[in-house]
Image (cartoon, rainbow, N blue to C red):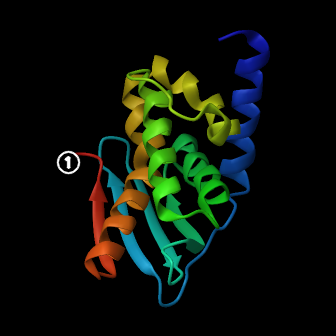
Amino acid sequence: MNDELRELYQQVILDHSRKPRNHGQLEGAVHVHGDNPSCGDEIDLYVKFDADGRIADVKFSGQGCAISQASASMMTLKVKGQPHGDAENLARDFRVVVTGEGKVANEDALGELQLLEGVQHFPQRVKCAMLGWRALEQAIQMRASGGSEGAASSED
Ligand code: ZN
């Protein structure tokens, strides 16, 4: 990663961790509690789906390291308004970005999320970056099965 990108990465992480977007709770939404015991990160994710399975609204609250909270904040901006299938594809591509394993299917969809590729150099941070996304994947699965309360642990 060159210096310019590293600086941008740090700015984006700081900005989102200090001012998380879509922060809060949603009544009547699918709720997933995600935790990452190895770092102490926690997230409560709330997802509302419309009748077509589109993510109508999404909010999160939580505590933990800057990467976990910033990644969740960036995720909410990306997936709000997306069909759940597109959000799942994005989650798969984001996992490739932060692990460096596999091939990204849709670079354009990732946009700013690609800045988090710096996480590749810190394997213990991958679970932090994935926490919100794992909770999202869990919420999408729960929608399919009709559930509304779930848990996603990075230790699974
Ligand atoms: Zn963390």
The residue furthest left is 156
Q: Quadrant of the N terminus?
A: top right
Q: Secondary structure at mark 1?
A: loop
* Most foreground residue, 90 or 65: 90
* Most foreground residue, 44 or 41: 44
The residue under the point 67% across, 36% down is 108
The residue furthest bottom is 28
Crowd rating for badge 1 (residues with CA inside 10 Å; few <14, some 14–19, many 20+): few
The quadrant in which residue 23 appears is: bottom right
Disc count in the image?
Answer: 1
* Most foreground residue, 26 or 142: 142
Amino acid on which disc 1 is placed: Asp
Q: What residue sits right under mark 1 in the picture?
A: 156
The residue under the point 54% across, 71% down is 54
Where does residue 11 sit, x and y in percent of width and height? 76, 34
The quadrant in which residue 38 appears is: top left
Where does residue 68 sit, x and y in percent of width and height? 51, 46
Horizontal arrangement in the rendering, residue 73 relative to residue 135 (left or right): right
Where does residue 72 sit, x and y in percent of width and height? 55, 53
The residue under the point 23% across, 45% down is 155
Where does residue 128 sit, x and y in percent of width and height? 44, 41
Residue labelled 1 has its Cβ within 8 Å of some atom of ligand 1: no
- Work out whether 5 lies above or below 73: above
Horizontal arrangement in the rendering, residue 122 relative to residue 69 (left or right): left
The residue furthest top is 2
The quadrant in which residue 140 appears is: bottom left
The residue under the point 62% across, 32% down is 107
Horizontal arrangement in the rendering, residue 115 relative to residue 121 (left or right): right
